[in-house]
Image (tube, grey):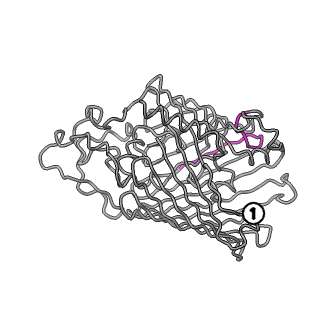
Amino acid sequence: MTVRLLALALVTSALALLCVPASATPIYAIRSANACDTCHIEPSGWYNPADVDRLCTLDCVGCHVDAAGGGMRKPAGVFYGREVLPTWGTRPSASANPKKYLAPGYPEKGRYRLFEGFSGWWAGTTPMAEIEERYGDIDPDPVFDWAYDYRGATFAPLEEDAAENDRNVVSFPMQADIYLMGRPMDNLVLYTSFGLQGAKRRNAQDGFTEEGVDAIDYLAVRELSVTYDRLPNNSYVRAGRFKPHYGWHLPDHTAFIRRDLGFDQNRQVFGIGGGYNPQYLFAHASAFYQGLDGWPGELGDEGIGGTVQAGYRALGWQAGGNVHVLNRTDGQNELTSGVFWGVNLYPVVYLGELDVRMKSAEADAAQAGSSGIFAYHELNWLVLRGFSLLTSYQWADPNLDLLDDHKHRGIAGMQWNPYTAIQLDLQYRANFQASDFTEHEVLFIFHSFL
């Protein structure tokens, strides 16, 4: 308890700094098909429940409280973060003794491969709830919990004239968020996340100067929702302020499919929604209002809209489609639709997304009636436990009516989880406008979480 209180004090202090939050990491959701010990003690000593009762989905909600992923982790997510991610550190499975639940002859290890299916994996007969040491010191069903995410970033431009263009090496807190969760009833979850927003973005939005900023202007209450969950087929309904479902919720909020489409770290809405979210066929829908004047952290333009997402998740691949409608009060209405997919070629995961955005003729003159196309591809290779290499390619043509406004970005990097609750990211990023190289940079991120 002393350690958790100390961590809370440190994160609360960090919230006095400039920060922007990151979202979920879909690579983990896809790769979890190869991490059976997240939901099963190897060598799998309990029975498989019927599909309608399963909580595993190969989706971000399998590990996160928020139905759209990101933020506070459920006990299964905390377990995954300690058991599967780090190279070193104490693993909860060290507390379990699964062999006492097994009949003679059970294999020692199960595995899944796309072209082989399962091998060496047998279902047992003991319900998970009866294995008391399952989570080690992790509370498997807390009534109240809290957590945090902290990311510190260092950005270094590499071009020779970077300083002349006001592109300097900078270090800054990228994220410092606190999450609170309460479960007063078995099927009811109360959830909130809050942090601070940067003054620069806030000033640009509202037109006031640094001298006119009050302390409350830095506060962002991003999510505040009530969810009725644990329904058959992992279904749920929710109301409040939340992130709408659309495409891959990448941790890189500067990706064209996030920032340019309006799904970056500042996109939260007020509304109602629900989902049918088992391992296979899934669907989510929501209706919302955004742009509530005076809400701490609200940066969206006022309007109403809705989203629909549906698809299929298998152990070796996932695919889905989205539709997003936003009718703004200023007449700049948008319709965004797209498809997203992922393939689990363990130890390699491939992610892709393709989106089309259409703006109404009532939009401003520069963008009137315009359409744009946005694409994302990523390969992520798990080289060894806790360490992976990645490369991604992004492309966008925000207005098909304009010549040579398309842009590209290539990224090569690594991600290392050296120890429990510690993650290090290093990326090289090259940016192009049309066929011309514009800038390149290195980005380093230190991530600590609970």
Which quarter of the figure has residue 123?
Answer: top left
Q: Nearer the viewer, residue 160 or 143?
A: 160
Residue 339 in which image quadrant: bottom right
User: Where residue 306 sits in the image (x, y, percent)?
Assistant: 67, 42
Q: Is residue 362 left or right of residue 285?
A: right
Q: Name the image quarter holding the N terminus.
A: top left
Mark 1 belongs to which amino acid? Answer: Asp
422 vs 49, nearest the viewer: 422
Tell me if residue 302 is in the magenta stretch. yes
Find residue 382 and report its horizontal and vertical position in percent: 40, 62
| On screen, residue 189 above or below 297 | above
In this view, the residue farthest toward the right is 365
| Residue 115 drawn in magenta | no
Label 1 crowd bin: few (<14), some (14–19), many (20+), radius 10 Å: few
Residue at image coords 33%, 39%: 50
Q: Which residues are magenta?
A: 295-310
- Seen at 23% across and 53% down, the residue is 109
Residue that protrudes farthest toward the bottom in the picture: 435
Q: Residue at x 62, y 70 (%)?
A: 430
Measuring from the top left, give residue 178's x and y in whole percent. 55, 37
Q: Which residue is mark 1?
A: 166
